[in-house]
Structures are given as structure tokens and as C-alpha cells.
Amino acid sequence: MSEERQLFMRPVKSNVTVSDLLISTTLTLAFLVGCGGGSMNNGGSKNGGGAPPGVPSVATSLYVFQNNDAFFPPSPSSVLQFLRTATGNVSPSATISGPANVVFSALSVDAAGDLYVAGQTIGTTAATGSEILVYAPGATGKASPLRTIAGSATGMQVLSTTTVSSMAIDAVSNLYVATDVQVGSGPSNRVYQGISVFSPTAAGNVAPAKSIAGDATGIFTPTQIALDSAANIYVANSAVQGPASILIFNSGATGNATPSGTLGGDKTNIYIPRGVAIDTAGNIYVASLDQNPPRGPGLGGTPRILVFAPGATGNVAPVRAITGSATTMGEIGNLRVDSAGNIYVLSGAGILKFAAGATGNVAPADSITSASLFQFDGGIAVQ
């Protein structure tokens, strides 16, 4: 989806007052993967019991969403489920139709198969903030969510233009959300782009357990967040208002925290980061465009998947890179890796899958498109 088509996304900003009037058409692609491990205390085990007849097991599935937001008010967004072994132009195995007043913006799945879908709520004339819907494993059609996280206390509605650009879930089911965060109160309060963390059982109008936001964090327009096995946080940081980089925060970071490490510089080839992922060995994967896109950030340039060694920080070269005409990568979005090391990246109107260890100018192992979609325009989750 072009930047011109996205109607209700967060503007680029470092910090603003709550009273600022903000209008934006900026596109942020969210591309997320479910994380394994830990017990899921979020309702999934109570409502699982296997998928309905005809619906593939969530353990072998991947999910994408599409938005029908070319007009106002938008038609319902939807989440499409495919088998991980799907290839070519295939129909989805199942579809969840979202509420009529929500434009989806991010997607994730936990180890129990519960599906987390973030969306911007749309009023009669404009956006009114964001919410997170949690669907049971195997949910299809116009399913009702198990629970919803929304309301003024969540911080996701601090500005009418607030969106969730990315989500990640740790091994004990804490939910990490890249969104606007209000810091302070009264006349001195500020709104920053940051990360809010919600407890595994969060539901309704609840405050996050903690937030990371403020000038010291350096977070500007996070295009994706990821977690390693120790719940350290990796943020793909846009180059719009500062140097392009991957910011790293330790698991205990809170408030106006300084990153524990930064991955960036000319040797890294990170110029316009569109996503970040961590595999089970701790390798760091970055989806990036080159430094000279012909139409501006996010609208062109050479796509690359860069792989860095575990613990890499500073201005260091990747240990391998996937790039070139054989990859068929175009306008890439976020990415994730599964437990076997396979890489999934959203590219244009399709999903590209690269085999574990892929490097250089290599063809994808598989690709998925679908006649059901006019555009994959948001996120992907892999269970």
C-alpha cells in the first residue's frame, strides 16, 4: 500500500503536547511473529480445544491482515490465515472479520495461539485512538474477541491519531506495544513515541505495567519491535528524525531509559530500517532499504535483509545479507524468523520465505500471494 493510501496513521514526531493537532498519512508496516515458551495466562487455553472443522491448526499457520481503508468510513479490516506450507496464489484457510470501526495496524500471536490485533478506532469523522483485540485460537468469521485492551488509562488514546505500529510477546505473555506514551502531567506533559508493556491478563481500560519513553530513549517512529529470549527489547528506529539504527534496551528498562546498545552506522548498511527480528540463537535480522531511495524514505530503494551476530552493537558489518534481483524483494515491510530459522518478510502484495542460512542473491524458498487480497498492507504473525 502506498503512503498516500493510508488514512489514519501516526505522524512522525519527537514529542508534542497533548493539545497539538496532528494529521498524518504516514504508513507504518508491522510484521510480527509469535514467541514460544512460557505458560499462557490470557484465556487462550480456556478457549482453545483445537481449531473448528476445516480450519488448519494454529501451530502450522501464518497470519496477515488487510485494510479496506481507501474510503471513509473504512470497510471492516480482516485477518487471513494460511498454512505455513502454502505457496503461490492461494486462498486463505480462514478469515477473521474485524469491527467496522477499526483499521488494523499491528499483529502478533502467542505460544497458545491467541491472536493479538491492534487497530485504530475510527469515529464518525476522524480517528479516535487505538485498541487491541485478542482472539481465541481458531477464531473465524465475525468472531468476538476474548478480551479488548482499550480506554484512556491504556495511553493508546492519548491522541486521536495514536496508532500501534508493532507488538511483541515475551515468554511469560507480557505484551509489548509500540505506541504513543504520555510522560508527566499537567501543563508540562509530553507525548513521546515509546513502548508500553501490559501484563498477561490485561483487559479493558487498564494502565500498562510500565512504559519506556522520553528524550533519552531516542525512539523515533519505531517500525518494529522484537524480543530476545531474555526479553531484551530491540527497536527498528526510523531515520526520519535521527540516525537509522536498532536500539537495544535491557529487559528491566523503564521510563526515560537510555538504550543499553545501538546497532547503526555505515558499516551496518542500516539506512531505512523496516523491521527487526531475533532468532532462537540471538542473531539479529534487519529489513532495510538503501540510503538513496528514488522517492524518499519508504518509497523505494534496494531492499536488504541484514543478519548480525548475537550481541552485535555499534558500527559493525552484518555477517550475511540477502539482497539482489533473484530475491524478488520489492517494497519490503517487517520480518520475523520461525523456530527453524526460516525468514518471512512482507513484500508488496505477498509474503516471501527464505530458508534458514540464506545469503546473497538467492531466490525465496516459497512465496504466497492471494486473489483474496488487493494488498498485504500491514503485518504478519507466524505461529
Image (cartoon, rainbow, N blue to C red):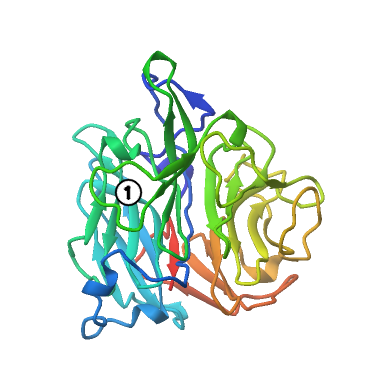
Residue 117 in which image quadrant:
bottom left
Q: Mark 1 highlights which residue?
A: 119
Which residue is nearer to you in this view: 235 or 289? Answer: 235
At a point 47% along the width and 74% down the height, the residue shown is: 368
Residue 76 placement, left or right of 322 = left
Mark 1 secondary-structure assignment: strand
Which residue is nearer to you in this view: 282 or 8? Answer: 282
Residue 241 vs 67, above or below: the answer is above
Furthest residue in direction front, as rendered? 252
The image position of residue 258, as x and y in percent, is: 63, 38
Residue 304 placement, left or right of 120 = right
At a point 33% along the width and 82% down the height, the residue shown is: 57
Amino acid type, mark 1: Gly
At a point 57% along the width and 65% down the height, the residue shown is: 229
Which residue is nearer to you in this view: 24 or 216? Answer: 216
Furthest residue in direction bottom, as rendered? 53
The image position of residue 108, as x and y in percent, is: 41, 61
Residue 338 in which image quadrant:
bottom right
At a point 43% along the width and 73% down the height, the residue shown is: 383
Residue 110 vs 16, above or below: the answer is below
